[in-house]
Amino acid sequence: MSRIMRIDENHAASHQNEGLKKVAATRRPVLGELGNRVLRHGSQDLLVKGGEKGSSLKAANPTLKNIKPRVDTRWKKTENVAVGAVTKKPITRSDASKTVADVKHVVITGAKTQSTAQEAVKVQVQLNKGNEVKHVGLKREESQLSLRSLAKQNRKGQQKTSCSSASSTEDIAQSSNVPAKTERLDTHSQKLLESIENIDINDAANPILLSEYVNDIYNYLNRLESTPGYALQENFLDGQKEVTHKMRTILIDWINEVHHQFKLDIDTYHMTVSLIDRYLQKVKTVPKRQLQLVGVTAMFIASKYEELFPPEIHDFVFITDDTYQKQQILDMEKEIVKQLDFNLGKPLPTHFLRRFSKAAKASDINHVLAKYLIELASVDYSTAHYKPSEIAAAALYISLYLFPVSSRGGNGSSSGKIWNRTVEHYTHFSVQDLTPIVRRLASVVKLVPRMMEKKVKSMWLKYSSSKLQCISTHPKLKGVEMDALIERDLPQ
């Protein structure tokens, strides 16, 4: 029994040893690791032996002669050939930092001799504001340079070219003795002088104010008011058979009263006056009985042009006490727009007054007084032929003369000046240009009591309200200041 047990144990032990041998035989290293290990040990043995003839990888370890490496290590696989350490000359800093001209010469000569070889250096030439900038790009396979060294070479090339260009410009400047001019970027549509204040400098954030185009817009309005289709001639009622300037004065006064009663915009009133005058200048055969029809129709057109919610045509029929019917107003509307060739949007005095008041930094009382003077000028026939910009500038001058603004600041303003350089620049008028208009407008103010006796008093009544600061009843309008404007030279 014991013998059988020993035989079974020996048999089991033999089987166990055979199993371990099989496991050991089946466990094989990875081929790539074996190949790299063989190559590494073989190369070390060859280097120690000094690279003797006939030595090879097979001599180093002949048992693994059929195993191929996973990575191509560029070792020669032919037998009986000596394998030595390949030595390459390392590229030093001096060789890598060659000049652009030398590198370019090497590339050209190499391209001529070897057609199959790749270019080792690429030279890119760019123009940067007139200066020639050369970028050198080296292939990493050929030159074995890192990206950091390539970047350093590019920076060195740029520094050399910039230094050479700077030295050349300095030589030119010294030889010609011409100072370099610095360019200024203007944010306005026209160049402003240093002594003139920029009144639109704080309006860039507001798109409604159009600070980038406002100067161009007002230059266009100045040109437009002088065109033959919009400008009025002096004594433009000459040639009318029935209509006189007194009839025109009564009509404009009534139009102002209706405008105030309907609570229309001030631009609607001035556009109505413009349409009436331009039509009377064009048509010389207007009957006296149709003069009020021309006025009502002109206000009807201006209301549709300026107002958000214009009055209906029945309101204009009612305001005439049914003197004219609806169809008559419509027919006259066709006649007016036909005679004016549909050119309705004439520049108005209030358009220019807003701009001029901003340039002069006028106060509320200055602006209200200027508006009152402009409406007085619209009634007077002797001032009807002046341009809207001239009327606005003259009215603002009188208001600044009567109520000086001492707190005005800026580069071109002073506390003692009425018409400073900033106001002169934006109005395009000097004091000498405004002298005849200011004197005529001052004389119209002095004639207000007589106009009221003739029942032409709608402007005076409107501006005597507390809402408009009772400006028409101010004592300065009747004092010696107005006489000084008429008789003496105008102060600056």
Image (cartoon, rainbow, N blue to C red):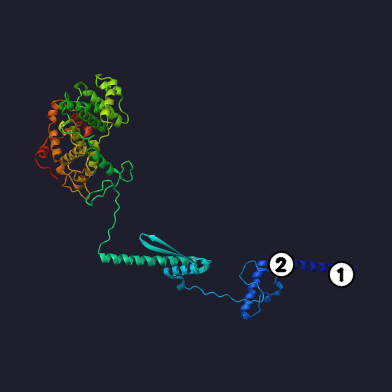
- State the image coordinates of residue 89 (x, y, percent, origin top left): 52, 75
The residue under label 1 is which amino acid type? Answer: Arg
Nearest the viewer among 296 and 362 is 296
Figure check: 335 above or below 177: above
Quarter of image, res 375: top left
For the residues labelled 2 and 1, the Cα–Cα distance comes to 35 Å
- State the image coordinates of residue 166 (x, y, percent, origin top left): 33, 65
Quarter of image, res 432: top left
Nearest the viewer among 436 and 356 is 436
- State the image coordinates of residue 184 (x, y, percent, origin top left): 29, 54
Identify the secondary structure beneath mark 2. loop
Can residue 173 be seen? yes
Which residue, given by chain and number where applicable, does mark 2 sit on?
28
Figure check: 464 above or below 184: above
**Left or right: 104 with respect to 77?**
left
Which residue, given by chain and number where applicable, does mark 1 sit on?
6
Identify the secondary structure beneath mark 1. helix
Nearest the viewer among 257 and 290 is 290
Q: Nearer the viewer, mark 2 or mark 1?
A: 2
Nearest the viewer among 248 and 399 is 248
Q: Earlier in the sequence, mark 2 or mark 1?
A: 1
- State the image coordinates of residue 8 (x, y, percent, origin top left): 86, 67
Question: Split into 4 quadrants, where in the image is the N terminus?
Answer: bottom right
Instruction: Please rate how many residues cluster around mark 1, counting C-alpha atoms within 10 Å: few if below 14, some from 14 to 19, many from 20.
Output: few
The residue under label 2 is which amino acid type? Answer: Arg
Quarter of image, res 47: bottom right
**Left or right: 137 with respect to 373?**
right
